[in-house]
Structures are given as structure tokens and as C-alpha cells.
Image (cartoon, rainbow, N blue to C red):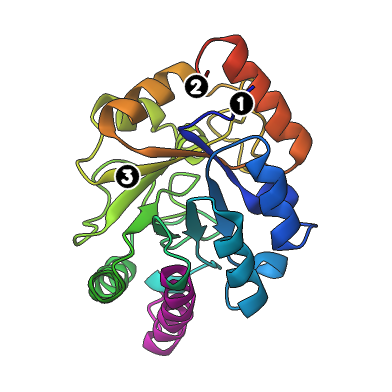
Amino acid sequence: MHPPHDIGISSSAYSELLLAAALERIAAVAAAAEIRSFGLHTLLSPRNRRAALASGLPCSVHGPFGYAGLGDPSEAARLEALDEHRRHLAAAAEIDATLYLVHPDWRPEPSLRDPAVVSALERSFDALRELQNETGVPIVVENMPGAGSSHFTAPGDLDLRGLGFALDVGHAAISGTLDAFLAAPPPEWRHVHLHSNAGVGDLDDPHLPVGAGVVDAAAVLAAARAAGASVVLELNSAGDVAASLAYLRGRGLIA
């Protein structure tokens, strides 16, 4: 059976393999990949950049992330996170990445909205927009899980300042905002992370296979295709990839 042409696979499912081997596994089941640029798969490694180019797969790139990161009120810490993205984005440009994904802020303990964090994020987004223009690699910002744990969990939370939007449907399910995102997708919507979980309050963010939780894959794919957004399965193991693809094929959602 031919790989589905509009579903990519994140290298997160093969994190224990060297990137060349991970991309070989992905190419056997999908026509596109997303490289998580950290650990064994960091694109700061020349060997990994060569592997990405040799694979022949269209590749999006997931940048590294931590907690406050781009939204850190400490200017020194914010600039450090931004510089890390600058280096990974340059590597993404070298492999002709289809897009580069960043996380905004995230914190394990929910708290009130902080104007200082919002301001820091907007300054970071402005800087990333300049890098987007310089490199030619589109940059997308991903929504995060858990209301109050990030300043970007619901539609309209942040001004993305000319960057694109990546809908992580599992994160949105945990935040209770998936229906809102699908009902009125932001015009900047470019990309989807598809996985599942038990819904609101499932704060462990387990990245379950499609069909194993509350996420309505049919609704997600219909909305994503209508918007022209790329879709990537972001899962934890090769077995979860196989189970998700079987579920999607069994329901006629992919060829």
C-alpha cells in the first residue's frame, strides 16, 4: 500500500534511533517527516543534516523547547532561547525545511495571565518573523496544553505577529479548546500535530494513538484539509504510528 500523501510522521516515534534510521522507517509508511531537532535527531549535527537531505522526504522541523523560553520575562533568558532557535532555524533552512515549529511559554503550575510574558512573547515573535524573512522557512507557533499553563491555549490568546499557527489537537483537547479552534480556525493555520488523550485535565499529555482517546480525527482532518494545513502524527513509538495509520485507513480517512 502506498504511503498516505498528506500525513507526515514525527521522528519522536523513533527517538532511540539515529536520524538516518528514523527517516528510513518513516519513509516506509509516510511521504513526509517532522524532525524533532534535539537529542539524537538534532539538526545542529552535520551528519543529521546530510541524513535529512539524503532521505528525499519533505521535512518540517520541531525546534527545541523548555519552559518559559521565548516568553521568559528575563531578557537574558529570552534572548538565549531565541538564539537557540536561530541556530536550529539556520539548520532547518539548510535542509530546505517546509516549516519550523516553536513552542511559546509553558509552566507546570497554572497561574494568571502575565502581561510581562505576553510582551516577551511578542518581542520574540517579532524577532522570529525577521528570521523567517531572512531564511525563507515559514515559522509556526504551537498551542500548549492546560488552561493557565501557557499564554497560548485558546483562539485569540496571542498575536502571532505574522507567524503561522500550528494546532496541536491533543493539547487543545486537554485545554478544552479543540472545538473552538476547529469551528473558527485562525487565518494563520498552517500545520497540525495529530494524537489523542483523555481530554480536559489529562495533563500528562500522553500522545496516545489516534482513535485511543477523545480526539475526533475525522473532524480534524476535514478542517485541516479545508485550510490547506499539513498534518503530522506526533506519537511516542513505532507501534503507535502503526495503530494510528491502521485506524485512519480503516475509517477511510487516508488512502
Where residue 252 appears, as percent x and y from the top left, is 52, 11
Q: From the image, tell me which residue sits under label 2.
A: 217
State the image quarter where residue 221 is shown. top left
Residue in the foreground of this view, choosing between 195 and 108? 195
**Magenta stretch in the rendered image:** 72-93
Residue 44, above or below 180: below
Mark 2 neighbour density, 10 Å: few (under 14) some (14–19) many (20 or more):
many
Numbered mark located on residue 91 in the image: none
Between label 3 and label 1, give the one nearer the viewer.
3
User: Are the two marked residues, 2 and 1, in contact with CB atoms closer than 8 angstroms?
Assistant: yes
Label of residue 210 in the image: 1
- Please give left or right for residue 20 compared with residue 185 in the image: right
Residue type for callout 1: Val
Give the CA separation, mark 3 to mark 1: 20 Å
- Crowd tier of the residue under label 1, counting other residues whose Cα lies within 10 Å: few below 14, some 14–19, many 20 or above: many
Q: Which residue is mark 3?
A: 190
Q: Which quarter of the figure has residue 187?
A: top left
Q: CA distance from mark 3 to mark 2?
A: 17 Å
Direction from residue 93 to residue 198 in the image, left or right: right
In percent of width and height, residue 107 lies at 52, 61
| Main secondary structure of the magenta stretch | helix
Can residue 220 be found in the magenta stretch?
A: no
Which of marks 1 and 3 precedes in the sequence?
A: 3
Spot occupied by residue 1 in the image (x, y as percentages of width and height)? 64, 21
Could you say whether the residue bearing mark 1 is in a helix, strand or loop? loop
User: On screen, 238 above or below 196?
Assistant: below
- The amino acid beneath tag 2 is Ala
x 27%, y 24%: residue: 183
Q: Dot 2: what SS?
A: helix
